[in-house]
Image (tube, rainbow, N blue to C red):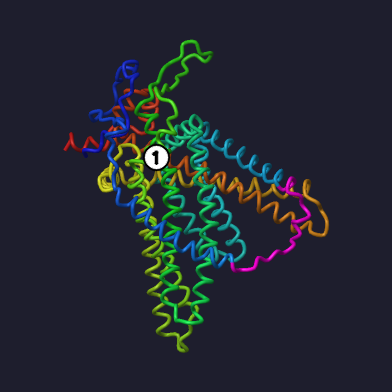
Amino acid sequence: MSSRHEHYEAAPLLETAHPSRATKNPLPPRRPPHVAPSHSRRFNDGWAAVLFGATLAAFGVLGGVAWQQVQQAAPRRDVSPAADVSPAAALRFFALAFAAATAFAAAYLALLVRIPRTLIAACYVAPIALLAAAAATAFAAGGLAAAAAPLLLLAVSVWAYAVIRPFLALTAVVLATASKIIQRFPGTVVVAAAGGLVWFVFTCVWAVVGAGVLKWLEVKGNKDDTTDVENVVMVFLCFVYFWVTQVILDVGHATTCGTVAAYFFTGVEVQDEGDEEAGQVHVVIPSTNVTGQSLYRTLTCAFGTVCFGSLLSALIQTLKAMARKNHESLRNSDNGDGGGNFFAVLVSACLLSIISIFGEVLDMFNKYTLTEVAIYGKGYCDAGKDTWNLFKMKGIDVIINNCAVSKVVAMGGFMCVLFTGMLGAMSAWLLLPMDDDAKLYLVLGTILFVVTGVVVFGFVGRVVDSAAAAMYVCLAEDPATIQLLQPDLFAAIEDVYPEVTWGMQSIAYNA
């Protein structure tokens, strides 16, 4: 664990921190991270960054081949009904969609701060209510036999909610605090949005390169048998797309986690006596541009580790894509009798399921591993070991917290789709020309609003998810520092979840 003390210096305002309050359980010793000087920072897993660069270079070579094909192809210009809409009107319409999605995301973030428990309960109660309605409808239509499946799912859902409900109080505090941090550091959302823009540009480039390479292989195929080469190139293109996409996502995740860690390990609760609201507490952070510093660390000393974790995810995603394609080809094939083909389809389905499950587990493991990387500056292997210890000591807590936060974010995304979809239809009806293509304008306007809403809320949702994961890791790793620097927050957490005082380090002192 030599890299544990690399990222954050001890809070300069430590002398202003509150005296340690009594806790319900003993705390492990304080071990906060600190920032190492720029010249002495350790660049972990540099080989992964080099491999990532080499992969992009190989993709660039394919891009050169594709560009030649694109230049040779004659462009086709089709006149679409949308040509009746001026560019200025289209831009205003898009600006309205962006403003509506941003307003909804900001409002939902405010709700996460004010009523997190209500939103979490709604995530679990709403499906239960829908299952109850489905069971009642099925019973009225076909009797008990028809309602058996909905009733079984309803019973399982009620039982699951009853089991995990005691754990959700901590999730509510985590969500509310994470949302407050995002409101204070909106740069985390800006970084995520910038990553989304980079991803969009790369996706467009990747699509052009893929089309050009396939055209080139098609031309060569008239002379030689290029089936094997085509398969290899397609697998490589899929791998590049998955890896670059995952790197972009993980850079945003690590940046958010680093920002949250700075908030907890350098911020000090200070009561403003002159505040109009008596007793209001502010968290003072003795640093400027916290998000920018976190992004810099992510793109420098931690970039190799980010590439390492993203590489593992990209490999699994590529294998999953290959398994799915193989499964679909076997399903669509016909051997006549169907006997052997059925067995092959069954095996391919099992293989696809195994890869999918492993991919979900790896994604969750990577999320918390890169959280450790962003907070403590560890290499991937050291961070992975500590993440494994986190799962061993607090596995059920981590899983429930992760699932609950994801459900709240997913519910917000669903509500955003409904809101932006209805607003898009109304806006298209009022703002766009209603002529012979009125239905088309309504459809296109609704789709534009929905897509914009999904993208904008997706940025905010991923940042909320990352901030919640970082807060949970900070609590599990070093509760003593948070209790010293931010006692009011720690007391609120301890009230709803007393076990939080037993951090991961406590296993070394209470064995």
Q: Which residue is mark 1?
A: 166
Q: Nearer the viewer, residue 190 or 325?
A: 190
Position above or below: 15 against 120 = above
Q: Residue at x 33, y 23 (%)?
A: 11
Total numbered labels: 1
* Residue 361 visible, this orientation: no
Residue reaching furthest to the top: 274
Residue under the point 45% across and 71% down: 325
Q: Quadrant of residue 465?
A: top left
Residue that appears at 56% across and 38% down: 108
- Tell me where residue 459 appears, x and y as whole percent: 52, 44
- Residue 367 percent coordinates (x, y): 38, 47
Please tell me whether residue 176 belongs to the stretch shown in magenta: no
Amino acid type for the residue under numbered disc 1: Pro
Residue in the foreground of this view, choosing between 193 and 110:
193
User: Which residue lies at the image location 55% right of the left edge and 68% below the top edge?
Assistant: 69
Instruction: Answer whether residue 328 is visible to the viewer in this image.
Output: yes
In the depicted structure, whether residue 122 falls above or below residue 29: below
Q: Where's the N terminus, which quadrant?
A: top left
Residue 497 as seen in the image, left or right of residue 103: left
Bounds of the magenta segment:
72-90
Instruction: For the C terminus, give its image quadrant.
Output: top left
In percent of width and height, residue 301 lies at 33, 41
